Amino acid sequence: MKKFLIPSSVVALLLPGLALAAYNDTSFATGVVLSIGGVTVTVSGTNAVIESMSVSTTAITVSLLPNSFIEVQSTDRKVIATNAPAGYIVTDTCSATASTLKLSSSISTGSMTITPSSGTCSGNASGNSTTVVSTGSGAGSAGGGGGGGGYTPTTRAAAATTPATAAAPATAVVATPATPASSLGARLTAEFGLGGKGSNVEALQTFLEAKGFLKMPAGVSKGTYGTLTRTAVMSYQKSKGISQTGYIGPQTRVAVNAELGASASAASPAAPATVVASENASFKRDLETGSKGSDVRALQAYLNSHGFSIAASGAGSPGNETELFGGLTRAALAKWQASVGITPAAGYFGPKTRAYIAANP
């Protein structure tokens, strides 16, 4: 049975256009106005069918049925972020009058959160509308690039059954290629989480399959850290008494390598991670879209070295970090926050995120 859950604190804000369809499916014929975390948004989708939806004081949690969509708009141009999993098409628009986040999918891939924040989206220099179309995993309202210069909208195709080849995040911190340590797979040589790609992810998936925590769908290649892998990691962490974040941090990496027969010292990150850790002392203030300074560069370096690259090449890429907090930095930060369980995963660098990085350099 489909569910639509809304707490009493926001019921009074719903417009008459909200209708409950047969079997408790929920559809929107007109906009529904909600106040989330002090930000007023309009939720709509003329042809959208919502499988389930709940509203808290900080976020909307929603599941869509196949071939449907949901759209959230802020006429105050507030940043709207989501941790939508791979398989969803995320369309971000930032115009001179509103910010809009639209989620759609041809398949049902589970629930996600939509989180408005106090930050303001940023379009191009002329103030015209900018739109970014991407696939799942932590997008947000369109904004400036991770580095300097004007914003250039980008378009990526929907997730294919075979993940696209991309630079492995682990190569930024691994001095030598991983060496097979046992029949279970190669040892893990870096930390990573949701959205990570490369040989470390493939080795982890091989290990989880051998231990019975993961079964990769037929026709899907290994090497991309998606929601299915994250669920398997959380189950493995639970079996080991490790905090169930779904992120491959020091404790989880040591536990996996111990079962692979690799020593903890062999799995330690290389020098680049140490450099980033020494820069973390500069994290003494909150950062958001538009912030500038050496601490922004340090944050970009931290994200790049932990598998959440600001950009594959050019400004913001590993070794080319900048001092400007733009839309690409916010998107990478939101993905990382979602992977380690920081909520809301809105791409805002506040006290909670600073404390986590201080404890996990």
Image (cartoon, grey):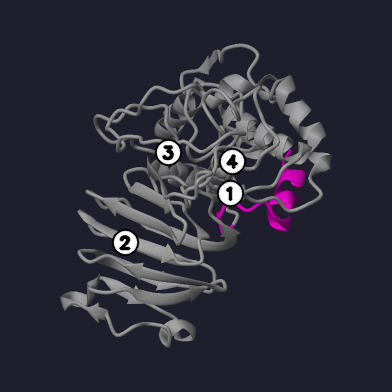
Q: Position of residue 38 (x, y in %)?
A: 57, 74
Residue displayed at 58% across by 34% down: 149
Q: Which residue is mark 4?
A: 329
Question: Foreground: 197 or 129?
Answer: 129
- Looking at marks 3 and 4 on the same chain, the residue that comes earlier in the sequence is marked by 3
- Looking at marks 1 and 4 on the same chain, the residue that comes earlier in the sequence is marked by 4
Q: Amino acid at mark 3?
A: Pro
Alpha carbon separation for disc pair 3 and 4: 15 Å
Label 2 close to label 3 by CB (< 8 Å):
no
Alpha carbon separation for disc pair 4 and 2: 25 Å
Q: Amino acid at mark 1?
A: Gln
Give the crowd class for mark 2: few <14, some 14-19, many >=20 residues within 10 Å: many
From the viewer's perspective, is the residue at label 1 or at label 4 nearer?
4
* Quadrant in the rendering for residue 86: top left
Q: Which residue is mark 3?
A: 153
Against 147, residue 35 (above or below) is: below
Q: Which residue is mark 2?
A: 70
